[in-house]
Amino acid sequence: MLRENNDINLIPVNVICPPAAITEDTVAVVWDKPELWKTIREYEIYVDNGIVGTTEKTGYTIRGLDSNVSYTITVRAITIDRELSGKSEPVFVTTKPKSELIDITDFGAVGDGVTLNTMAIQQAIDECPKDGKVVVPKGIFLSGAIFLKSNMTFFLAEGAVLLGSPDIKDYPLMEYRFEGREQLCYASLVNTKTQAERHENITIAGPGMINANGEKLFRAEMDEKSGIRGRAICIRNVDNLYLQDVTVRQSPAWCVHLIYCNNVSINNVQIYTKYDENGVRYKDIFNGDGIDPDSCSNVYIFNSLIASQDDCIAIKSGRDEEGRAVGIPCENVRITDCIFNSGFGVAIGSEMSGGVRNVLVRDCEFNDTFSIGTVKAPRGRGNVIENITYENVTHKNFSTDHKDCRWFRGAIYVDQFYSHETFDVDAAEPVDEGTAIIRDITFKDIELETVGGNAIYLAGLPESPLINITLDNVTAKGKRGMKAMNIEGLCMKGVTVVSCEDDAYYFKNVKESKR
């Protein structure tokens, strides 16, 4: 039997419904751990004083709700000693009204995997009423680029597959930002319309699948070279965007690219850009990031799985002079309770010229990823990366697919010489608008083991050292140990580094170091 314990330090805090994370029958909530979180076993979730579920995570999706009904949601913690905390502050939500359903087969779409359905699907989208739901039923629906609009849901039912056409003629050339610059690109499989207008209230939901057919498109687009490769999903200029329960796979380039979006939630999404769900490796795909929030704000990514060919998540904001001129940062990003299999973990940059700030990566699991976190801003980028925290994560990399090189140099990796094969850490250059600043970066409660190379690699510029780097309760074992260069304010508390090949620690031009 559970005992009541109303100690305020046990009560979950900051319980919220993330941006846009409400449908007609579901509501997602996330929260922060209480102060005594290490004593907690799980959490109970209540709707109108009735318990609806338990979880060990700090996020939960309540399902089976009635449409257009107001609910009160609270969360309680259960300790390992079977004590039940008091209730959190309540969250008041109202589910969306019942949507009008628009079935793409009513517009002539055929789910045989052969018939090209682009026009039928686009007609369904165009005729969808405000707050309506375009439904892709069970079947394999071949399509070229489609374009979503404001105030709609694009829903893929159980067993539904939106399969990208292998013909590049089905993807018109468009101006997109890619790798930090506006460039001519092939349209993605799922897009928003023109860059000139903003959109609002778009949901893409499963349990079905978006398969961009990247193996075939990658080679065709690379051979023709009329533009940069498209993505599986490229959503631009949207306020209130929700991706829920959908699987996205096999993009010809980055998988889910979000540009200039505000108030974004990505919940229980599975992304496969290196292997399919059965572990079969895709051919002819590279630069296959999982999710790229690009000059976006208020982004919540939770309870999701990413098996990536490149960065699992890459947080970006434009490149060099063009990015600084646009000047839109990526900020307020929360990544929690996610699993990352393969790839390069959660990256900040290197296209960060609009600035990146306030990023939290917490309670995540990294399996055979080369890194946990990479924070990278070479000369020329300018602006600031600040207030970045990786907390309570585990990392085990036994993959020999990659080793240290100019693109990645450690399991924990903060680098201002990113992409440089050779460099002199003592050779300062003049400070100008292209000189980036990296400050206030924290790695806390980390356990990592890697065969890839350095366990920890921290390198600032001599003219712009890293500022205020904290390693707190970090246990790191690597093929090589820890390297730290050009840092103003390195704080190390409870850090253990084990190196298999060289000295555990190498420091150069590091001030205020505590070890």
Image (cartoon, rainbow, N blue to C red):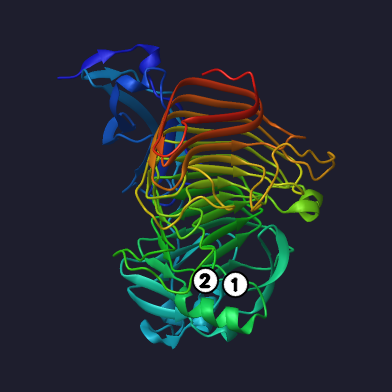
CA gap, disc 2 to disc 1? 6 Å
Classify 110 as above or below 233: below
User: Amino acid type of disc 2?
Assistant: Pro
Classify 184 as above or below 151: below
User: Is residue 169 or residue 345 the one in the foreground?
Assistant: 345
User: Is residue 428 or residue 30 the one in the foreground?
Assistant: 428
User: Amino acid type of disc 1?
Assistant: Arg
Residue that label 2 marks: 252
Residue at (62% x, 84% y) in the render: 224
Classify 483 as above or below 267: above
Q: Position of residue 494 (x, y in %)?
A: 44, 20
Disc 2 to disc 1: CB gap under 8 Å:
yes
Tell me the quadrant of the picture where the N terminus can be found. top left
Mark 1 residue element: loop
Classify 67 as above or below 430: below
Q: In the rendered image, which quarter is residue 257 located in?
A: bottom right
Residue that label 1 marks: 229
Q: Is residue 59 left or right of residue 204?
A: left
